[in-house]
Image (spheres, rainbow, N blue to C red):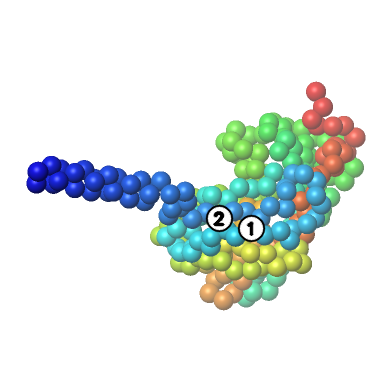
Amino acid sequence: MFQRKQSIFIIGAVIIALVLLCAFFFTPGADTPDIQLADPAPGTGNGDDLTAESPAAPVVEITTENVQAVIATLTRIESYSREIRQTRYWDGGQSYGSRMATILVTPEIMRLRWDNNENMVITADTYHLWFGGGAVITRPVTAGLGESLDKILDQFQGIPSYETVLELDPAQIIAAGYTERNIGGELRTVIYVAVETGTLGYTDFFYICLSTGLLVEMETFDGEIPIYRLETLHLSLKIPLPEDFHLSDGSDPLAG
């Protein structure tokens, strides 16, 4: 009788242990904090509304050790337009010139319009270049620029993206976290990453917008002296119109 009671006790203990293990390992969301991007319905043509923020998403503490993994969860919006400015500085911190560009993006095609009247329209395999209303030069996209249209655009703009941050040596990252930056006149929550470069001893600061997945600002300093700055002056989630991508002769680069 004693052995029978002992057996029942052991079986009961095993069942309880299994229930506890299942509860620990299969509870939805256990130990899997997530960053949910703001949902201004990008790609639906809702205009310039960038005010929506993620509802009730658990805040993930960002450290120098996990910041690249957190950034890897972000998704870049598919359609948008923005105006950027790149400024370079003399050794003493005096600005010696800036360049501005308007960028229009959809999943199939992108356009760059620089302030010197240089225009470029880019598809996955072709780019078209012209100045002002001049003749269009058409060339194939050089192999090796990147597998995605996003990466090709980054190459042609000559600006970094959040993929740039993912490719950094983790040992170079000296600070990371959340902050707010003025993006097109509106404060937005961003992830910042500070990186020490080994060659010149500069410090790079990258700012990646949570709600769009775009790298919206970058700064490079030599100590406290500015070297380079990239900033977003305007950002819209409105889908660009098809005619926004027409070439100087009026032709549609996506037409058969």
Residue 18 visible in the shown view: yes
Label 1 crowd (10 A; few <14 / some 14-19 / many >=20) = some
What residue is drawn where x is 71% and y is 58%?
52
What residue is drawn where x is 74% and y is 58%?
50
What residue is drawn where x is 76% and y is 51%?
237
* Vertical arrangement, residue 135 with respect to residue 39, above or below: above
Residue 31 occupies which quadrant of the picture? bottom left
How far across and how far down the image is residue 225, in percent? 59, 74
Which quadrant is the N terminus positioned in?
Answer: top left
What residue is drawn where x is 64% and y is 68%?
180
Q: Looking at the image, tell me whether mark 1 or mark 2 is earlier in sequence order.
A: 2
Residue reaching furthest top? 256
Nearest to the observer: residue 229 or residue 88: 229
Residue 227 visible in the shown view: no
Q: Secondary structure at mark 2?
A: loop
* Vertical arrangement, residue 180 with respect to residue 148, above or below: below
Q: To which residue does mark 2 refer?
A: 35
Q: To which residue does mark 1 refer?
A: 54
Nearest to the observer: residue 51 or residue 180: 51
**Number of on-image labels:** 2
How far across and how far down the image is residue 47, in percent? 81, 52
Residue type, label 1: Ser
Image check: 58 left or right of 106?
left
Q: Mark 1–mark 2 contact, CB under 8 Å?
A: yes
Residue type, label 2: Ile
